[in-house]
Image (spheres, helix red, strand yellow):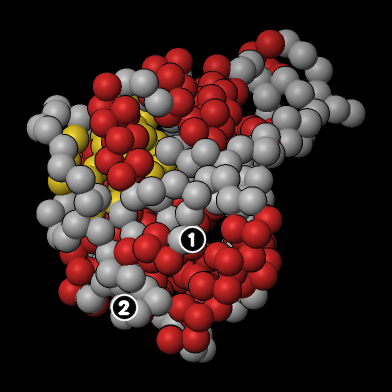
Amino acid sequence: MLADFSISRLDETRRERIQSAIDNKTKPPGSLGRIEELALAIALCQQTETPSADPARLLIFAGDHGLTAEGVSAWPSKVTTQMVLNFLSGGAAANVFAKTNNVAITVADAGIIGDLPDHPDLVRAKIRKGTANALQEDALSLQEVDQALAFGARIAADAVQNGTKTVLLGEMGIGNTSSASLLAHAIAGIDLETLTGPGAGLDGDGVNRKLEILHKTAARRPGELEPRDALSAYGGLEIACMAGALIGAASAGGMVLVDGFIATAAALCALKARPEAAGYTVFSHRSKEPGHHAVLQALDATPLLDLDLRLGEGTGALLAFPLLRNACAMLNDMATFESAGVSGKE
């Protein structure tokens, strides 16, 4: 998948030197826990002992899903377009958190049904308007999957090549928790009962109906699927774009900060196909969506935060981003025992 985007393996010869630099800061070794792990990961990714999390850019990929016709969401598909307009006008939670944390935003129309005006922060994939109904037929052709993967990869790789150090992955797409559940079921073999939750607000009866539809949809393409085939079967365009963006950013040497359930399903697709990208990937938080924990377990990933978030948009990644910034500051600016004249452990 995306064979043209080669990913350099981390230079393990640097690991001991960077770890020694972290351990020689004025603190007991390991006392800053995950912050020390983050500093090491970012330094290895950037191939430097003076890493930086900034500048950062949030990529919000938006797409619509034909499966919403089956009632798997509490919201109509038109909300996808309405929320993209909200992103472009600066009114969403993602905009507020991005502004607070000095993170730039690019909004990508991966394949929404509605029409959008031109905007300097908007890019368009121009693949198709929404996916097909995955209950009835494949959501996307393999060619459309490849186009979406390449679109996401190019945006992320270009951002890193133009100076972005951290790429944050977010999404918007009514019905996309259904696609994420189906992808995780097909790729990682997780049962749909574990993966299926309320999404953007289904009640108990709604979740049961959703689960019934997902079982019927999964039965159309039974058994384990490779990521590209799973994306073809179940969509969505925004998920394929995020999978491509993770690979594209990693190929250019950028750190990728993954948001919640949907973005993690995209990461599952990317890392199953391109495991060498794992060293460039950080998982920001554990969503309240019940399937997210199972997908994180399948990836052997430990997220940074657990705040009961379930909004998407990249909001969890934005809230976790200051931890990356502080991890870099610790490595770059904190005194060593020698420089501070502090005695080391005897």
Image disc number at residue 138: 2
Nearer the observer: mark 2 or 1; the answer is: 1
Quarter where residue 231 is shown: bottom left
The span from disc 2 to disc 1 (Cα, nearest Å) is: 17 Å
- The image shows residue 261 at horizontal and vertical percentages of 54, 52
Quadrant of the image containing the N terminus: bottom left
345 left or right, relative to 203: right
In what element is the residue under mark 2?
Answer: loop
Give the farthest residue toward the top.
341
In percent of width and height, residue 123 lies at 17, 41
User: Which residue is painted at 61% across and 18% down in the image?
Assistant: 334
Q: Amino acid at mark 1?
A: Val
| Residue 157 image position (x, y, % from top left) | 25, 47
> Quick check: can you spot residue 281?
no
Where is mark 1, residue-wise? 72
SS class of the residue under badge 1? loop
- Where is residue 299 shown, x and y percent of the image? 59, 63
Residue 47, above or below 233 = above
Name the residue: 43% across, 66% down.
70
- Viewer-proximal residue, 255 or 232? 232
Closest to the observer, 115 or 30: 115
When the figure is inspected, residue 78 is found, relative to residue 127, above or below; the finding is: above
Whether residue 78 sits left or right of residue 230 in the image: it is: left
Count of labels shown?
2
Q: Residue furthest right?
A: 346
